[in-house]
Amino acid sequence: MNSILEKLGVDYLLVNSTNKYLAEYSALSENARYTLTGFTGSTGDALITRDKIYLFVDGRYHIQADLEVNEATTVVKLQVGQLQDDEIKKIIDKNKVLGIVSKKVSQSRLELYEGYNIKLITEDPINNYTEPHNKKFVKAFEPVKYSSKPALITNPEEVSYITGLRDFSRDYSSKIWAKLFIDGNKRVLFENDEDCDKFLSEYDSELLVDKYSINAYEYSLIKKPVFEPSNIMLLKSVKSDKELEAYKFAFERTDKAMLAIRDYIEKNDNLSEYDISEKLREEYIRYGAKNLSFSPIVAINKNSAQAHYSKSSKEVFLKEGDLVLIDSGAYYESGLATDITRVFVKGKPSELQKKVYTLVLKAFLNCYGSFNNIDITGFEIDTYAHKMLDNKIDGFTFNHGLGHGIGINVHELPPNLSQSEVAKYNITDGMCFTIEPGLYNPKHFGIRLENSCYKKDGKIHSFVKMGYETKLIDFSMLTFQESILLEAFKIL
């Protein structure tokens, strides 16, 4: 690694997991952090120093990172409340040179390092990915009526929302990879970097930009930038009636795909994680999916204790008494991401499996049914869920947020259900989000139950209609109210 640092003339190098659009889910082929460390998780950056490579991961990835990283990498396991950049600052010497790839860091994040000795690098020295030119935009909704002072929208999900366009040519994405200039009612769509960069270099008037979504390289090209946080993020979080209806239709087919995979598991023996994952893809396509909304998680036994396990091994087989956790979703013609998690057992479950499953189910039912007709934040619902699950059973932990917004991306803000600052906003009518409590023990297994929901007329409703595994429920643990809430879902 010293040779890279010396060639760049830096003492440290920040290696990002994002692409130039700052997208969470980018292909591994364009993920420099993966190239460097071997870690396949969707988030978490790396830092190269003179003698070490550090990888920073949150609680969802603590186990996975240990299993995946190469020998040269030291895993830094962030705890709830710890911020990645704060931990990076503890490692670096403020007076030495930190290299940052300007096309893969937001302007707002770059400014967090004000006062540090920063050298901006235009091209990524770890993975200089070239984007394929196979874009194919299709119309999913009518363009949204939206006017603005001269502004450049750089977030692909926001561009997709405003234009009503989708692109299914990439795996795990429906967004159009483009940027949009708006001036009043005038709109110019930039489908490639060269055209956008030329426009920015020549534009002489003030230009509104959101420093949270524009990369530092593009920001540097603007002559008169005016920072204004985008209000499109909030607009697209409140789904229209047409979007809600499209979502309902999408989840009808998602339910069918998951029911089919449950039947497949019940009727077949000696299935590997890979077998189940491939069959799952087939079922989604059979029910009309354009592509999947993320790489599906199919995790048997101990692997299910990794909240975002991503291997789908050909060597791990489902045997009698084994649990399998399946977290998946898809895009249909609306380009809105579905997301659901269910846990199945092959044959007869153990008492421990039933106890943990029922505890997680109780948490879901209470979070789903206890917050109607009141103003509530995702922060408060998450706190409630953790009170129900934390320290309830030895060795099992709930180490992630309760849920996230869904939309054009499978993870969307707002809303958010966690202990972060972004979760301290009210969940309002029209917002769509997941409720996904879980308990995990790396010596045994993990249970997560996830429904995608929406708020309408002050009440939380579930898009997901698929029920829960009767044989995994200890009904003696349910209160009367929880039993009533469970009736909303068909018990299989």
Image: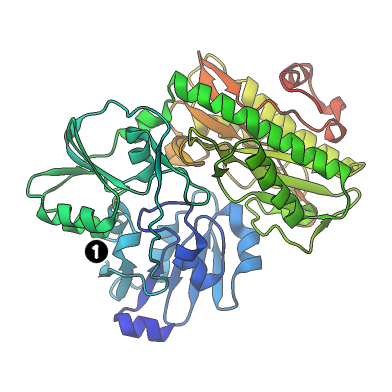
Left or right: residue 37 versus residue 115 is: right
Taking the image as drawn, is residue 26 in sight?
A: yes
Q: In the rendered image, which quarter is residue 66 located in? A: bottom right
Q: Which residue is mark 1?
A: 115
Left or right: residue 139 versus residue 372 is: left
Above or below: residue 200 compared with residue 460: below
Q: Position of residue 61 (x, y in %)?
A: 60, 56
Q: Amino acid at mark 1?
A: Gly
Left or right: residue 318 versus residue 457 is: right
Instruction: Determine the residue positioned at 76% across, 54% down.
Output: 275
Q: Position of residue 479 (x, y in %)?
A: 79, 21
Q: Position of residue 302 (x, y in %)?
A: 77, 56
Instruction: Determine the residue positioned at 68% across, 25% down.
Output: 465
Categorize mark 1 by other alpha carbons within 10 Å: few (<14), some (14-19), many (20+). Answer: few
Taking the image as drawn, is residue 429 in sight?
A: no
Above or below: residue 221 compared with residue 152: below
Q: Which colour style is shown?
A: rainbow
